[in-house]
Every structure is written in structure tokens, then in C-alpha cells.
Amino acid sequence: MKICVLVKEVPDAAVQKRIDPSTGRMDRNGEKNLNPYDTHAIEAAMQIREGGAVEVDEIVAVTMGPSTAIRALHKAVSLGADRSVHLSDDALAGSDVAATGYALAQTLKRESPDLVLLGQQSDDGECYTIGAVVADHLQMPSLTQVIQMDVEAGPPTQLRCERQAEYGYDTVQVELPAVISVGDAINEPRYPSLKAIMGAKKKPLDALAIGDVDIAADRVGESGSKVICGDFKAPPAKSAGEIIEDEDTNETVEKIVAWLDERKLI
Amino acid sequence: MADILVYALHYEGAFNKNSLGAVSEGARLAAEAGGECHAVVVGGSDLTDELCATLGRYGAAKVFRAEAPEGLAQPVIDVMAKVMDDNGHRYALFGGGLLGFEIGAGLAARLNAGVTMEVTGVNVVGGELQAERPILGDSSISTSKYKDRGIIIGRLNAFEIRGDGAGDAVVESVQVELSPWSTRAKMVQRGEQRGADVDIEGADILVAGGRGLGKAEGFELCDELAKAFGGNAAVAATRAVVDAGWYPYAAQIGQTGKTVSPKLYLAAGISGAIQHKVGMQSSENIVAINKDANAPIFEFSDLGIVGDLNKILPKLAEAVKAKKGS
Ligand SMILES: Cc1cc2nc3c(=O)[nH]c(=O)nc-3n(C[C@H](O)[C@H](O)[C@H](O)COP(=O)(O)OP(=O)(O)OC[C@H]3O[C@@H](n4cnc5c(N)ncnc54)[C@H](O)[C@@H]3O)c2cc1C
Ligand SMILES: Nc1ncnc2c1ncn2[C@@H]1O[C@H](COP(=O)(O)O)[C@@H](O)[C@H]1O
């Protein structure tokens, strides 16, 4: 079985995120890293491989992004992926969620995966929806926010998945091929070994442009996106809260109690 | 025609509160844009004519009912795509919830439509809908316009429920053939409650704990503080710690948990992710203890304490107890 893992490069959490007012796009400059949520997807792939219920032939990391996104792929490979695929093209710049999902799906079709794994959300986008878009294009069943996943060897191979939805925990049986986004509670990602980090750059990496994967240029990028985003404005101003730096805890606690007392909360 | 189709999720014979908010909002927008608001419901025999017709009170002129498995996104995508194509709806609207995100996104792929999630407000401009979405940790709000069809997914609790509509909606059953892939996922168990059945919605004071507590036993610190407050205080939690099995699901606040608005909400070791915030932001007083000065929760706290909860919580419990006794 072949597992493709979608990974994304995101600005480091420590870096202030901002919108470039001239283009209306997210300013993605500054320190970049592999989206931390995606490390759980790679780990999930590794645990299926090591679990032995099914034979995993290959784990392939796939990303769409600018040239710097290669670093996210190297990190993914150091965490266990066998090789990686990098879709990069100027025509993709400014793609909205639907266009990004379409482009990723076209890229994935070339790999014919049995299972596509992805993270629960990208650290910078806060939309947790790419999985559902990709799945519809690939015509595969799909589930997001999965926190427990057990493989039942087939045929057909199935996944028994658990996740929290609006009314409690749901258990869903999903037949492969499928697209699954995993929550961060699913596992504890391992640390890459020094050897794996050193070797990551030597693993095969396919660099692809939109023509290589049959992506219609008029369905991606800013012009191919169906949403026009703009008119950025500040949210209604909220008076800033009081902040106490805890240096002397007795004093801090005194202040908290006084604050609560003033508001008749004790 | 700017007709709007709203997905109404239901469970055990009742419609979801956020769905009712979305139907109310859809009705308001349709009236302003000169169209109609319709609802779509998917499920089994529990979706009686009577139950479906009640959506009229929230402003739905018509309800499309399809028989298909519920609780999963893809059958609903099949139904909504067909209903929208057959009836020419331009917009689809969802209340906040996990399924809405999945259905809306899949529907955008199916219909090649534009989609916006986490929407907190929708406006009619020139007969068309525009959606407002807070981005970058709610530090900015962007406006989405749609070139063609638009799919709008609300943030939890974003749309107000208005149940004063005309009366019964017309109910129309629709037959939809499910896509082959939609039938390859099957619900084995839905809505399982894990852990004790605790009540956090009735509490005046909530001491909420997150991953910063370090381990399940960390909740003892929260329990102690809640006990010190006495009376109507309870302990709540984030999804991170509920999923980890540290605390019961019934105590979870947020997107896939409860919505609360106590007099005092005190967070210990909680980062303040959007999906948590949507469930507690209307609390009267918000106090946060976090060792990271950059934690998002400080952006919406009334009192923020930058420090180690392990040092602060025990002393705070003592001090509250002493104050109560005095
Ligand atoms: C579709 C979807 C639905 C979701 N639904 C929900 C939901 O219903 N409810 C919910 O809560 N989340 C939900 N989430 C998850 C949410 O995005 C966050 O991951 C989660 O809220 C984080 O929980 P946390 O704050 O406990 O953990 P973290 O984000 O890991 O934060 C832990 C915090 O503790 C602090 N800390 C660590 N040690 C200490 C110490 N010794 N003293 C003081 N502070 C310390 C850290 O600085 C950090 O800020 C959902 C996510 C998605 C994608
Ligand atoms: N440009 C991208 N390239 C590859 N994977 C992506 C990309 N954008 C999002 N993803 C994947 O989709 C997941 C959810 O992202 P999102 O829907 O953007 O919150 C991420 O954790 C990634 O696994």
C-alpha cells in the first residue's frame, strides 16, 4: 500500500503573522517550518508501516508551495517519508482553498495512493478543510480530525477511525482508498535522528509544475480562485486586559484575589 | 436569483442550535437579497414532516428532505449538490460545526464554488452576499466576495437564532443517488460520551484546564481551586486534554464541545485557540494563567497572569479559601 502525506510549510509560530496590505495575501516571509500538525500525519503513516497489519511499500510527502517549501519536504523525509513531491508554479500563487485542494488532488492522482493523510489544520490558515476538498476531487471517502485509527487488513482494507464531532465521539469505518486528516491527539511524533536529517536531502524529490500534473491553469491561482478576499479591517477594538508578570507568587496571588474581589467574584 | 440553501443538522429528533442560527441568518439575507431561504435535511425516518416543517419558524420557506446516512459529510454533499443544481441556489450556508466545514469544503470542490469558513458576519451588497472572516488569530477581518457560487461556513455561535418566522415550511422529499465513495464510510457509533457526566453549563465560575497542566493529575490543581470558590464552581477543559483522556468530554468547551458564559472563566495552561475561544468568549470575566507571554489567550483576557500555573494555582486556592473564610 502507498501512503501520501500532505505537508505544508508555515511561518514559524514565533513569527508575527501579517497580511501584506498591497496584495491582500498572507505575508509568508520570515522563518518557515513544517506545519507542526503535519508531523502527526507523518507519524501516523510510520505507525501503520510499523504496525504490520498491512504492507506499506512507500510513504510519499507531497506539498504545494514556493521553492522554500523544499525544507518542509526535507523535514518530512527526515521523519520517515521515503521520497517527496513538490508542486511549485507561479500560476499557483494566490490560490484559494478550493483551488489549492484541486491542485493537490491532481498531483496526488499521479501517485494513485491507497491512503492520503494530512494534518488537522495548517498553523497559518486556520481552515481545516483541504482534506474534504481533496477527497471530493479524488472521489474517495474522507474524515477529518481523526484521533484513533486502526487498520483492518482486507480485502477491502479498512480503517476504523475515531474522532470528536458535534455530539461526542464518533467511530467510523472507512474503506480505502481514503483521505484522512488526523488530530494532534493521535500520536506523539518522534524526533528525527541526526542520520535521518543528514540523509534527507539525498532522498528522491520530484519537482513538478502545473503542466506535469494536468492542472488547468484557469482553475488555480488568483484568477482561478472563486473567492475574492480583500477589504481588510481591524476587528472592533477591545480594551486590553491587565497583565501581571509573576515574579513574587504571593504578591501575584494577592493581586488576583483583589481583582476578583473588586468584581464580587469571590 | 439569490436563493440560499442552508444545511440543518439534527440529532436525536432536534435540530442543532447552530443550524437554526444559520437558517435564521439565511432567511434574513434572502429577504434582503430578494430570494428565498431553503433548508436541506438528511437522515432517516426520524425526520418527520412535522419536525422538518418547524424550520419555517426560523424562516425557511421550503425544506428539502433526503433519506441518507447522517453524521457523515459526503452523503450530504451529494444531496446538496443535486438540490442546488436542480433548483439554482446560488449560495449555501452552514452554522458552525465540524460537519459544516467538511460538507461546505467538499461541496465547493463538487460545484467549483468559492468557500469561506469561520465566518462571523454576512452582508448583502448589490444583491450579492459578502462574508466577513476574522483571520490571523482574529487580528484582522477579511471580506470574501464570490465570483460565482458561494459557500459560507459560519463560526460557532456566529448567527443569532430568530424563531419568530411565519409558520410551517413546505417539505419536499428528494431522491438522491449517493456517490460510490460516499457509501464507503460507515458510522459505527455516533455521539459517544466519554468520561463522567459533569455539568459546566450551569456553573457561575469555571476553572478551565489545558495541556499546560502537564498530565491528568494536573487537574487536581483545578479541582482544588474550584472547591475553594465553592458553591457554583466547576472544572472545564480543552479538546487537547479531553482527547488525551485527562478529563471527561462533558466538560469540554469549544467548537465540538459546550458553549458557556459564566461570571468568571479562569484558564490555566490554555493557549486560547480559536476553536476554544468560540465556546467561552462571552464569559463575563476572563482570567488566564499561562507561562507564555505571547499566548493568544492574553489577547482576549481581562486579567492575564504570565507565570507557572504549578506555582500559582495552589497558592491561589489557599488565598481564595482564606478570603471566603474571612
Ligand atoms: C475542527 C476543530 C475543532 C476543535 N474543537 C475544539 C474544542 O471544541 N475545544 C477546544 O478546546 N479545542 C478544540 N480544537 C483544538 C484547538 O485548536 C487547540 O488545539 C486546543 O484548544 C488546544 O488546547 P490547549 O490550550 O489545552 O493546549 P495547547 O494549545 O497546547 O496550550 C497549552 C498552553 O499551556 C501553556 N503552559 C504550558 N505549561 C505551563 C505551565 N507550567 N504554566 C502555565 N502555562 C503553561 C503553554 O504556554 C500553552 O499556551 C479544535 C480544533 C479543530 C481543528
Ligand atoms: N499547500 C499545501 N500543500 C500540501 N498540503 C497542504 C497544503 N495546504 C494544506 N495542506 C494540508 O492540509 C492540512 C489542513 O490544512 P488547512 O485545511 O489549510 O488547515 C495541513 O495540515 C496539510 O497537511
Image: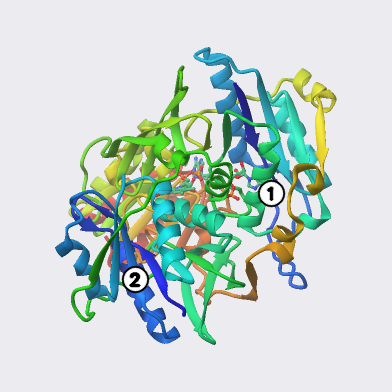
Residue B105 placed where, x, y %? Answer: 51, 54
Question: Relative to residue B25, is residue A133 depicted above or below?
Answer: above
Q: Is residue A251 left or right of residue B314?
A: right
Q: Chain of mark 2?
A: B
Residue closest to the far top? A52
Name the residue beneath numbered marker 2: B38
Q: Could you say whether the residue bearing mark 1 is in a helix, strand or loop? A: helix
Q: Could you say whether the residue bearing mark 2 is in a helix, strand or loop? A: strand
Quadrant of res A161: top left
Quadrant where the C terminus of chain A sits is bottom left
Do we see residue B305 in this rendering?
Answer: no
Total labels: the figure holds: 2
Residue at 34%, 71% (x, y): give it.
Answer: B38
Residue at 57%, 60% (x, y): give it.
Answer: B137
Question: Relative to residue B129, is residue B50 depicted above or below?
Answer: above
Q: Nearer the viewer, residue A127 or A204?
A: A204
Residue A194 placed where, x, y %? Answer: 76, 21
Name the residue beneath numbered marker 1: A103
Residue A242 placed where, x, y %? Answer: 49, 66
Q: Nearer the viewer, residue B213 or B261?
A: B261
Q: Nearer the viewer, residue A192 or B317?
A: A192
Q: Chain of mark 1?
A: A
Identified by mark 1, the residue type is: Ala
Q: Is residue B317 left or right of residue A23?
A: left
